[in-house]
């Protein structure tokens, strides 16, 4: 008799375990049951919680003129500096033999000239 009870209990416990795990297994297998994740806001989008007027100073036409004048003055000083650097580079290159490779200071001077020229170009674009 105890053997029959043991088998009955084992069968009952097994059936109860399957019945309790069935909803969990069904939820794990169903692909469309889960809600989609919420979309992430773009880092470049304006913040809707940010109060208006705090995005920076609004540029009015008088400020634009002042900025253009300042950019023009910077372009003039940078162009003068660019001319001086290019003249110095030309003198250094003339001193070097054409058979040897360029020295590191000459290459660095050329990179400095290139960087300054790009800066002038960006200022000119506005």
Image (cartoon, rainbow, N blue to C red):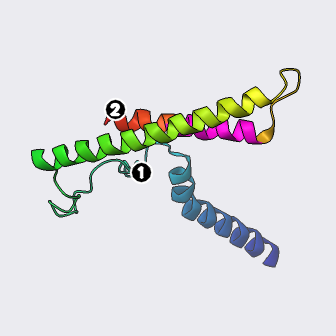
In the current view of this chain or complex, which residue is farthest to the bottom?
Answer: 2
Residue at 26% x, 56% y: name it: 47
Closest to the observer: 66 or 11?
66
Examine the rendered structure and indicate whether residue 31 appears above or below residue 92.
Answer: below
What is the x, y in percent for residue 64?
A: 18, 45
Q: Which residue is mark 2?
A: 125
Question: Residue at left 81%, top 36%?
Answer: 103
Q: Is residue 110 above or below residue 41?
A: above
In front: label 2 or label 1:
2
**Spot occupied by residue 110 in the image (x, y as percentages of width and height):** 65, 35
Look at the image and say whether residue 1 sits in the magenta stretch: no
Q: Is residue 24 left or right of residue 121?
A: right
Q: Is residue 108 magenta?
A: yes
Task: Using the image as rendered, state which of residue 61 and residue 86 is in the foreground.
Answer: 86
Stretch of the chain drawn in magenta: 105-116
* Lower sequence index among marks 2 and 1: 1
Instruction: Quadrant for the C terminus, please.
Output: top left
Return the residue found at the far left: 61
- Please give the residue where the numbered disc 1 appears in the rendered image: 37
Residue 87 % position (x, y) = 60, 33
The residue positioned 44% from the left and 42% from the top of the image is 78
Main SS, magenta residues: helix
Residue 96 in which image quadrant:
top right
- In this view, the residue in front, 8 or 59, is 59
Which one is in front, 86 or 125? 86
Q: Can I make out residue 60 in this image?
A: no
Task: Please state if 47 lies on the left or on the right of 77 as rendered.
Answer: left
């Amino acid at each position: 008799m105890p053997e029959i009870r043991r088998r009955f209990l084992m069968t009952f416990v097994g059936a109860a375990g399957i019945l309790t795990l069935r909803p969990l297994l069904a939820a794990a297998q169903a692909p469309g049951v889960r809600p989609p994740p919420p979309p992430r806001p773009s880092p470049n989008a304006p913040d809707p919680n940010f109060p208006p007027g705090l995005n920076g100073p609004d540029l009015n036409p008088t400020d634009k003129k002042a900025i253009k004048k300042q950019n023009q003055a910077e372009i003039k000083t940078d162009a003068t500096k660019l001319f001086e650097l290019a003249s110095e580079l030309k003198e250094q290159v003339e001193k070097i033999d054409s058979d040897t490779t360029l020295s590191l200071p000459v290459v660095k001077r050329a990179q400095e000239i290139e960087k300054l020229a790009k800066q002038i170009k960006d200022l000119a674009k506005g």
